[in-house]
Image (cartoon, rainbow, N blue to C red):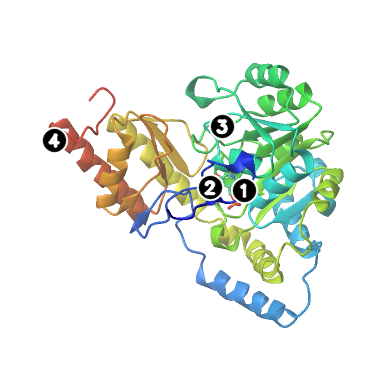
Amino acid sequence: MAFTLEDLPIRDDLRGQSPYGAPQKHVRVALNVNENTHPVPQDVVDDILTSMRTALATINRYPDREFVTLRQALAGYLNAGLEAQQHLGVEQLWAANGSNEVIQQILQAFGGPGRSVLGFPPTYSMHSILASGTGTAWIAEERDAEFQIAPETVVAAIRRHSPDIVFLCGPNNPTGTPLSLETIAAAYDATDGIVMVDEAYAEFMPRERPSAITLLGGRERLLVSRTMSKAFAFAGARVGYLAAHPAVIDALRLVRLPYHLSALTQAAAVAALRHAPAMLQMVDEIIVQRDRMVDELRAMGYHPYETWSNFVLFGGVADPRAAFEELLEHDVIVRDLGIPGHLRVSAGTADETSAFLDALRAITARAEVGSGTGIGRLGA
Ligand SMILES: *Cc1c(COP(=O)(O)O)cnc(C)c1O
């Protein structure tokens, strides 16, 4: 019998758990993990390389443990989109290796054994996985129709469970659903605990819609996490960040590893932020492709949900597993999240989006003529 992790003296609460599992396959059209499929422009790559070369000259030394230059750059980026009275100071910013690490640090500081975090599935799968890794009890509550969360819904859930932490995700992954500021404010008022809003997709929201960052003033227990992985086309660099009261940042200093952000990561992120407009110039194009996906999915008879992100969740898929496999045969990978009748697809370039839509159209047509594959529209 092969030796497996079950034979190890692993923590009891980790036995039988599954790791984060989005398949990493080499497929021509990869629309499965909500990456920005547009590469970083070459002149920006060159400038990032110049900064990294400079950082390498002192790579024998530990990096700036407080990554002050990066925090200044992040404050500058966020403040550009805020009213003057909402401006953030450097002491309100924090960063780590992806927002996943930021969220882990939040759980290390405010969660842990004997404490709980409330979430609203379907939501980002890492929220519960990180809860489990830090020994924090995960409490799952239900969403309203169309995967929305009304203020009354979040307040009732908080009253029911008195969690130490509330995780909200807006726009929500994997549904794309908006999250209203009213719901966030109501959650904050209903708890003495921490409220964390995961805004990984903030740059894809309608321009006139304010971020949860605009609520930070006077709300010391509200935390807003962001990432450079999606809109910034920087997933491979691993840079996530957080805006919150300076006292929250002090709490995260207690649990972070010393020098957790490498000098190369800091240099790359600072350089990329210098080129924010160029890095973000594809966002509008991605939104065009996302909206095209919504329209064409609806025309095919599927049920796409309202989305403020760079992906679309759609229902009406008779057999998501089979549809996933058939799309793979067309060299297109999407995400089967195990939500019955649903698949999620990231908006790609115009060509990638066409490839996905053409493949799905072919599969849908085949299912309709009764090929017996069991894939098809709602009611097919
Ligand atoms: C993609 C995503 C992240 C990003 O995580 P990183 O560690 O920054 O790459 C965070 N939250 C949500 C909801 C996401 O979908």
Mark 4 and mark 3: span between their CA atoms? 38 Å
Q: State which quarter of the image contains the C terminus.
A: top left
Nearer the observer: mark 4 or 2; the answer is 2
Packing grade of label 3 (10 A; few <14, some 14-19, many >=20) is many
Mark 2 and mark 3: span between their CA atoms? 40 Å
Q: Is mark 3 within 8 Å of ligand 1?
A: no
Q: Earlier in the sequence, mark 1 or mark 3?
A: 1
Residue 127 in view: no
Nearer the observer: mark 1 or 3; the answer is 1
Number of labels in the image equals 4
Mark 4 and mark 2: span between their CA atoms? 43 Å
Residue nearest the viewer, comparing 232 with 20: 20
Kindly identify which residue carries mark 2: 6
The residue under the point 65% across, 40% down is: 131
Residue nearest the viewer, comparing 283 with 143: 143
Residue nearest the viewer, comparing 167 with 219: 167
Kindly identify which residue carries mark 3: 178
Instruction: Give the numbered dot on residue 10.
Output: 1
Could you tell me if the residues under marks 4 and 3 are in contact, i.e. CB atoms within 8 Å?
A: no
Q: Earlier in the sequence, mark 2 or mark 3?
A: 2
Kindly identify which residue carries mark 4: 371
Reply above or below: 74 against 245. Answer: below
Q: Amino acid at mark 3?
A: Pro
Could you tell me if the residues under marks 1 and 2 are in contact, i.e. CB atoms within 8 Å?
A: yes
